[in-house]
Amino acid sequence: MSGLTLESVDRSGAIAEAFDELTGGTRADFFRKGLIGGGAMLAALETPALAQPRNTKKDVAILRFDLNLEYLQAAMYSEAERLGQVRERTLEWSRVVGANERGHVKAIRGLLGRDAVPSPSFNFRGVTEDDRTFTETAVAFEDLTAALLKTQAVQVDSRRVLAALASLHSVEARHAAWIRHIANIVPAAEAFDQPTSKTKVVRLVESTNFVTSLPRTRGRRKPGFTG
Amino acid sequence: MRPTWRSGFGAALVIGGLLIAAAVAVVVIAAPSDSSPADPALPSPPRPAFTPENVPLGGPPVVYWAPVLAATTVRDRPAGHGAMAEVEARTPEGTANLVLISRQAKRAAGRLWVRVRAAGQPDDVSGWVPRSSLGGYTPVRTRLMVDRGRLTVTLLRDGRPVFRADAGMGTPGTPTPTGRFYVRNKLHRYSSPFYGPVAFGTSARSAAASDWPAGGFVGIHGTNHPELIPGRVSAGCIRLKNRAILRLARLMDVGTPVTVR
């Protein structure tokens, strides 16, 4: 086992240099917010699901949580791809994995319809511009998502949602194994994978400080421009 | 030839034998392989609630901007000593200050440095700042082209024009500066008919108004004198009729690069 976790990635210092002096208190607790609301904002934008049975409250909560995690991953891969600062070899797998993660976002949003939450804003703190840290963070998030989906598989009410989550789970596990192999980490060191709890996921994601508040770029002060 | 009783008996024997053999075969095939009762039928697998498809990034290149989290110095190289400009965390209007990201990053002196474009004096400056002094990156798909000769502004989204309007610009004595700049903020609901209902702040500075209390920054805003548009009437700012600036406000994002020529 590599012992690679989000905590270890965060401790490396490559993700967040001197975070304390920068954004204390500006970080949004996006998972908690995601569970409370925000769906109404998307109501007008979403294409209604095609004659889908209504999701139970528990399934909506689980799917919203997953959506937030998928938003984070999709944003990270998209930013790395657009910035083009990691190695070409890294970009090759990142493009594939990113396209999968964006597909997950689209699919979950489609299923949630008006219950979907909007994406939070992110600050990846240089991770998308540093090859080694990007690869390590990708492994950590893919492992984390696979572990979370394992837990949720026994929690969802709907068998149809279970079938969908199972299809995500295997893809996330493939991502993890693929990137682990590239990073020279044993892809499957243990005989059994352990599930992880939502609480632990929240704690780990918060430890990265990737989720931020949008900066205030609008104001009401009288302009002082040259006129 | 007439069949004998012997041949008829033989045929009946053969048919009877075949029937018995068939019956035995049916019983053997139908019998369970062990003595336990048959397994209950398995439920059919459910149709998944969704089936994701790959979503490639696609689209034309975007520009990224980031807020300045802590005042910092723009340097000529990563961890270098040459200071090119000081960048504050706030604009004179009290909003978060922004820089454009130039997609170059390097590690130096144990830190990650990124190349940015920041508001300078008199023009934007390009140099290096610590990544830790910036917030998250936001992509922008729009670009504003300002034509001083034709007195027009054109907004492009993904390279295609989506908005065009006549504009008022600087007088010959106080010209609108030319070059590459970007939108830093968006002001609204203030009380000033002179600036119209919406005003965008840019990183451009008027050389003729550098001692202006708010730094002489050029804005893109509405007006209470629409009859002067188009024309060379301002102290450097780009003025649009109020209807046009309201439309532009719906289309143009903060961080949009601005080219004045």
Image (cartoon, coloured by chain):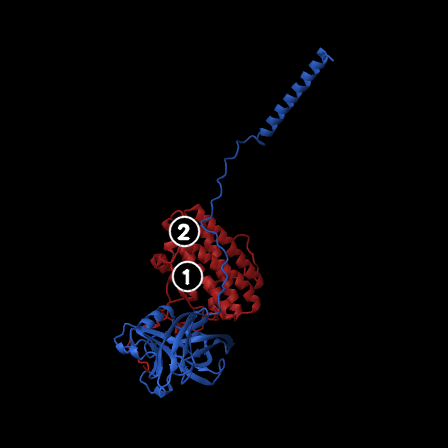
Q: Residues within 10 Å of mark 1 (few under 14, many from 20)?
A: few
Q: Residues within 10 Å of mark 2 (few under 14, many from 20)?
A: some
Q: Viewer-proximal residue, B47 or A29?
A: B47
Q: Which chain is blue?
A: B
Q: Position of residue A3 (x, y in %)?
A: 52, 62
Q: Position of residue B222 (x, y in %)?
A: 31, 75
Tell me the quarter of the picture where residue A88 sits. Answer: bottom right
Task: Give the distance between the C-alpha atoms of the residues marked 1 and 2, in whole angstroms.
Answer: 32 Å
Q: Residue at x 29, y 78 (%)?
A: B227
Q: Viewer-proximal residue, A25 or A212?
A: A212
B12 left or right, relative to B51: right
State which quarter of the image contains the C terminus of chain A: bottom left
A82 left or right, relative to B69: right
A192 left or right, relative to B202: right
Q: State whether residue B46 is above or below residue B165.
A: above
Q: Chain of mark 2?
A: A
Q: Position of residue A114 (x, y in %)?
A: 36, 55
Q: Residue A151, which numbered label?
A: none
Q: Residue at x 45, y 85 (%)?
A: B83
Helix, strand or loop at disc 2? loop
Q: Residue A49, which numbered label?
A: 2
Q: Chain of mark 1?
A: A
Residue on which disc 1 sits? A203
